Amino acid sequence: MQAPTTRPEVLPDELDIVDDDEVEAPAPEPDVDSDVEGENAPVRATPRRVAAPIAHAAAEHLRGINPRHAVILAVVIGFVTLTLAMPVRTYFSQRAEFDQLRESNAQLRKEVADYQQKVNEQGDPAYTEAKARSRLQYARPGETVLVLSFPGEQARKAAAERDAARARNPWYGNLWDSISTPVTK
């Protein structure tokens, strides 16, 4: 029976680092003689390509993991993930709803304050008198009322449209219109 043999560790300065393009098929080397048994059996180290230290360390670490343990660990992690997924999703949705309700409450508080101010103003006799004078054009006995009439909304819109049309015209067109059209007051 042959004793288990271990590979001797090869130091990085003994290895040949080769690009993938330069790799040639190595000549087949004979294996260890099967006639020789024991601890002094010669073992030949073949130079290997050096991988990145992190990848090499990860590969060495993964070699020591039992596949059955890896599957059990993956199942446990999957179970925990699925178990926590719904509560986390619920937490974030409730948090968003809470923020929305907080903004809505702030808006409602602002509206309540505005309405409270209006109620307080309407209870004031000076405010009521000022509104009656402005909206209903009331006056006290002995006061002279002066009513100013402004152009209606339609007249203002028509004037704004004429000004916009004039602005769109080129300058020489506006000059010609001002000369050819008489001014009416």
Image (cartoon, rainbow, N blue to C red):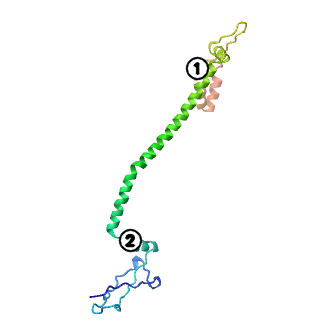
Instruction: Name the element at disc 1.
Output: helix
Answer few, some or many: residues within 10 Å of disc 1's Cα (few below 14, many 20 plus, some between 14 and 19). Answer: few
144 over 78 or under it: above or below: above
**49 lies left or right of 143:** left
Asked if the residue under mark 1 is in contact with the one under mark 2, i.e. CB atoms within 8 Å, the reply is: no
- Residue 94 in which image quadrant: top left
Identity, as a three-letter code, of the amino acid under mark 2: Leu
Identity of the residue drawn at 70% across and 10% down: 145
Identity, as a three-letter code, of the amino acid under mark 1: Glu
- Residue 63 in which image quadrant: bottom left
Q: Nearer the viewer, residue 152 or 35?
A: 35
**Image position, residue 143 (x, y; %):** 72, 9
Q: Residue furthest top?
A: 141
* Residue at which label 1 appears: 153
Identity of the residue drawn at 43% across and 73% down: 57
Instruction: Name the element at disc 2.
Output: helix
Which label is found at residue 38? none
Q: Nearer the viewer, residue 180 or 112?
A: 112
2 or 1: tag closer to the N-terminus? 2
